[in-house]
Image: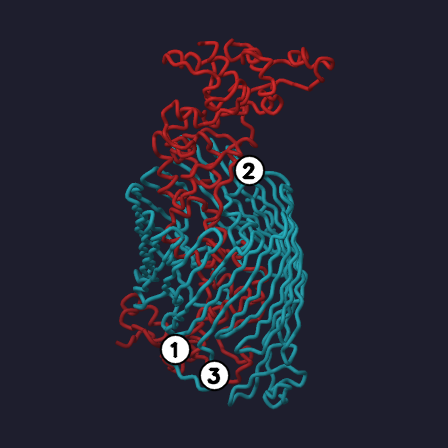
């Protein structure tokens, strides 16, 4: 019984190792070997080699009996993150009084001798009574067969890159806080099977101390798995229209974005950060500024940003209004009211309050009333009467 | 002279991590340099009697500059070409995050910037003061609460507000609830300096004498299908105890089915007593197609320490739509359009007819003919009150897979007529840019653009944008515990050039 098991398990090793499987046609040699352990002694003998050496092949493939072959046994640890040990399974299975052999995992039912194939995860799941597809296994099941990535030292970065994606990760809600965020906080979370702290920090740069992240070991190989792609909702021009969703779902944004991403634009002197506006925007900014496609002053301080440049360029009017700049309209100063109420933020880029008070003041000016639709004098006076005194002096009308 | 404190700051910033951090830190130094040039205008005057009739039929100087004469005035004014300004802004931004000080959840965040102009004048905005602390705070974050102390930023639909103070976030992740409260001494809108700074007042306008006190709160509720968020913000002048601003905003997003989203929000100005901006949009987005339609309204907000709010700025209402779809594996098309109309300004201006309606739209295509190649072309057109712009732009980028460099060439043409000023010019821009990822920790960019103008004014008094513009950038990253060069793909792929980060 033990021998059969050993034989069966030895085939598992053979097929589990890419080099051996690619280099050796088992079915073609079915008449040569009577037992798996003829070549794979390590399955049943602790410390013995798992693969035959070159001399074993050369005993037949000597150039006379059979043509020579090049065979180099696989060296070093297997590229695997399996906890699987043939020795432990031999003992464990024997303890259960069962009698599986190598073919139990490595051959289809009824297959001929040495007509073997790679063991599939489904065989493992069957024995371990996990009744789902491999990648749909419950979160607590991964650790039954797999080591945490940080402990699977034989895996290369390239191996990690080819990890399959579980279907749960494709759920639209998975990238969010209530998706993977909630999952990561469960005690039995098996994120560590495929991921390490470095992977999380790709997005959660500012949150290394989060318990779920801190619980993972660091491992740069985990960076081989690219974090998710931009959500489909981002689409074109999302930078222009992200304000509402970003404010409403700030926690969701934080799943991928870090503070520095926002501060690239949402920061003082944002003009130093290219990216939001298209190339050459400076030349085209008058149109965008006049019509206020977005609120310029959310990112730019009118005084230090707009006016500084306009001062250098001569595009300012200090204290006294003079005609000249708005030269496409001969009487622009006299008829600027609509333009001003529509694009007041633009006017402020070149004009100061004193310019307007030249005419729009109840004290010393021409007493032209600037208040328009929606103006609530009583409310404004209640909130800040100093605004009123700029034009009305100390005598604020009731 | 101004270089010395900058070098000092850079040195301190670079050395600080090794001195103060515990288990880990990330530091990014981002230095940018560019050359810019433009020739502005200067105001001049001429006796009214000396003017002649210009080619446009209006008055002009004998040497051909269009002038503006005010009835009853003995002289007319006009703009002559001014001096050429050459700027060479150099800025370095240091972004530091450090953690592991012996208390789980405790971290330090710092973003500061050194900037100055190496040119012949302060032609580049925002270089004063040379050293600016954008944010600098300590954070203590646990699962249910986060506390921040120091200079920080609050961002909401009410805008961007920097302040020196404290902020607390409480959350119940099980129920998706979040409550944020913050307060402190405010910074100027869109700047890292107080409202009292002379740098914010180049025109010697009215200016507050004390920094405003800022206090705000946000409440949010998030589920898999619904997000709701409400914001309140007030600013108070501590000298007089009067309001500088007081606003309230609410917004919500609903995702009833996979790929379908509906979002909306509005804000109300409690100080002025009117609704500010608002929007409502709905869309459908899957991997090959994203489309949305919506309506919105925009009204600017002015603080009460200015008089601008008393001039009753009117809002505009807009309807917009956009679509972005992948036609084939290589080709992606995009289209976007918006029409808007300003509310009635309630002002009689028989002498000047100003546009009240406008529109803006753009079409574009992106083609990936083969691995590593990206071709993009777009057309945009804006027409509305004050100004218009019509332009074409195109670019070709070669970024061979698994190679550390990227090269692109681009060109654009822009016609930008103004409503209230003689048509300035058609500007053509063409140039090239290259990026080289030297290592995981070092990235460099260099670009060169040529701005070429075709003057369309009836005289010579206009801006002159003709110039060569050189841009360069070096990003250095330091840190422990994780790869530094790999930004989240979501960020690298973000539309709008964010990949350049």
Q: Earlier in the sequence, mark 3 or mark 2?
A: 3
Q: Kindly identify the residue that appears in the image at 66 percent across and 69 percent down.
A: B453
* Front position in the image: B212 or B176: B176
As drawn, is B49 to the left or to the right of B159? right
| Helix, strand or loop for disc 1 | loop
Image height of A384 relative to A370, above or below: above
Give x and y (percent) for residue A142.
Answer: 41, 28
Of label 3 and label 1, which has the lower sequence position? 1
Chain letter for red? A
Marks 3/1 same chain = yes
Is the Cβ of the residue at disc 2 closer than 8 Å to that at disc 1? no
Quick check: B221 above or below A33? Answer: below
**Colour representing chain B:** cyan
- Disc 3, SS: loop
Q: Tag 1 or tag 2, which sits nearer the N-term?
A: 1
- Indicate which label's residue lies in the foreground, 2 or 1: 1
Image mark for residue B352: 3
Residue highlighted by disc 1 = B345
C-alpha distance separating marks 2 and 1:
54 Å
């Amino acid at each position: 019984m033990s021998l059969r098991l050993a034989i069966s398990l030895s085939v598992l090793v053979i097929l589990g190792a890419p080099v051996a499987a690619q280099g050796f046609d088992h079915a073609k040699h079915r008449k040569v070997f009577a037992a798996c352990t003829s070549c794979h002694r390590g399955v049943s003998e602790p410390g013995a080699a798992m693969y035959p050496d070159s001399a074993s092949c050369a005993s037949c493939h000597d150039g006379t009996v059979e043509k020579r072959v090049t065979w180099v046994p696989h060296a070093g640890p297997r590229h695997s993150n399996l906890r699987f040990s043939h020795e432990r399974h031999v003992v464990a299975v024997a303890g259960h009084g069962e009698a599986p052999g190598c073919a139990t995992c490595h051959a289809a039912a009824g297959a001929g001798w040495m007509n073997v194939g790679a063991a599939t995860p489904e065989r493992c799941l069957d024995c371990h009574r996990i009744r789902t597809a491999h990648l749909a296994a419950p979160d607590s099941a991964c650790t039954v067969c797999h080591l945490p990535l940080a402990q699977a030292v034989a895996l290369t970065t390239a191996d990690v890159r080819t990890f399959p994606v579980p279907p749960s990760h494709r759920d639209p809600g998975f990238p969010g806080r209530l998706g993977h965020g909630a999952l990561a906080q469960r005690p039995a979370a098996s994120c560590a099977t495929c991921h390490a702290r470095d992977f999380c920090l790709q997005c959660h740069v500012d949150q290394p101390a989060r318990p779920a992240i801190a619980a993972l070991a660091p491992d740069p190989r985990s960076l081989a798995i690219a974090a998710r792609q931009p959500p489909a909702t981002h689409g074109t021009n999302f930078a222009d229209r992200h304000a509402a969703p970003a404010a409403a779902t700030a926690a969701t944004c934080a799943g991928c974005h870090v503070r520095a991403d926002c501060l690239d634009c949402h920061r003082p002197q944002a003009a130093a950060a290219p990216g939001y506006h298209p190339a050459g925007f400076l030349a085209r900014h008058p149109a965008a500024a006049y019509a206020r496609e977005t609120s310029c002053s959310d990112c730019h301080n009118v005084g230090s940003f707009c006016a500084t440049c306009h001062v250098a360029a001569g595009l300012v009017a200090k204290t006294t209004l003079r005609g000249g700049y708005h030269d496409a309209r001969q009487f622009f100063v006299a008829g600027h009211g609509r333009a001003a109420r529509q694009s007041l933020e633009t006017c402020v880029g070149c004009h100061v309050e004193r310019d307007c008070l030249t005419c729009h003041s109840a004290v010393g000016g021409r007493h032209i009333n600037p208040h328009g639709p929606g103006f609530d004098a009583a409310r404004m006076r209640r909130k800040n009467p100093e605004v009123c005194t700029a034009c009305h002096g100390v005598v604020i009308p009731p | 002279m101004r270089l010395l404190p900058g070098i000092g700051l850079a040195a301190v910033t670079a050395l600080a991590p090794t001195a103060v951090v515990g288990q880990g830190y990330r530091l990014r130094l981002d230095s940018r340099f560019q050359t810019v040039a433009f020739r502005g205008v200067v105001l001049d005057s001429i006796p009214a009697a000396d003017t002649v009739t210009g080619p446009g039929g209006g008055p002009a100087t004998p040497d051909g500059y269009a002038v503006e004469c005010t009835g009853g005035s003995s002289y007319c004014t006009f703009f002559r070409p001014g001096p050429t300004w050459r700027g060479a802004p150099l800025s370095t931004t240091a972004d530091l995050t450090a953690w592991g000080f012996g208390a789980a959840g405790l971290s330090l965040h710092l973003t500061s910037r050194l900037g100055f102009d190496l040119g012949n004048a302060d032609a580049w905005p925002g270089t004063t003061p040379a050293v600016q602390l954008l944010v600098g705070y300590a954070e203590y974050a646990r699962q249910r609460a986060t506390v921040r102390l120091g200079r920080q930023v609050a961002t909401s639909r009410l805008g961007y507000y920097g302040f020196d103070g404290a902020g607390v976030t409480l959350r119940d992740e099980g129920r998706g609830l979040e409550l944020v409260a913050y307060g402190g001494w405010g910074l100027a809108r869109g700047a890292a300096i107080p409202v009292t700074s002379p740098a914010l007042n180049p025109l010697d306008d009215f200016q507050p004498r004390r920094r405003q006190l800022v206090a705000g709160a946000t409440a949010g509720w998030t589920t898999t299908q619904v997000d709701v968020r409400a914001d309140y913000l007030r600013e108070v002048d501590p000298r007089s105890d009067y309001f500088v601003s007081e606003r309230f905003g609410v917004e919500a997003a609903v995702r009833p089915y996979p790929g379908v989203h509906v979002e909306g929000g509005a804000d109300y100005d409690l100080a002025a007593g009117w609704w500010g901006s608002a929007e409502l949009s709905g869309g459908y987005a899957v991997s090959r197609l994203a489309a949305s339609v919506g309506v919105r309204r925009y009204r600017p907000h002015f603080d009460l320490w200015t008089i601008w709010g008393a001039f009753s700025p009117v809002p505009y209402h807009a309807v917009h739509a956009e679509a972005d779809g992948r036609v084939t594996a290589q080709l992606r098309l995009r289209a976007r359009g918006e029409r808007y109309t300003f509310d009635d300004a309630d002002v009689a201006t028989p002498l000047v007819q100003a546009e009240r309606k406008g529109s803006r739209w753009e079409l574009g295509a992106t083609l990936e003919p083969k691995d590593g190649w990206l071709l993009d072309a777009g057309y945009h057109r804006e027409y509305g009150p004050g100004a218009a712009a019509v332009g074409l732009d195109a670019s070709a980028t070669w970024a061979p897979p698994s190679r550390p460099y990227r090269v692109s060439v681009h060109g654009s043409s822009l016609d930008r007529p103004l409503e209230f000023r003689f048509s300035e010019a058609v500007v053509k821009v063409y140039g090239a840019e290259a990026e080289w990822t030297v290592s995981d920790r070092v990235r460099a960019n260099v670009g060169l653009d040529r701005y070429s103008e075709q003057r369309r004014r009836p005289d010579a008094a206009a801006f002159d944008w003709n110039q060569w513009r050189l841009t360069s950038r070096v990003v250095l990253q330091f840190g422990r515990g994780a790869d530094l060069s790999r930004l989240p793909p979501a960020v690298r792929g973000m539309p709008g050039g964010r990949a350049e980060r």
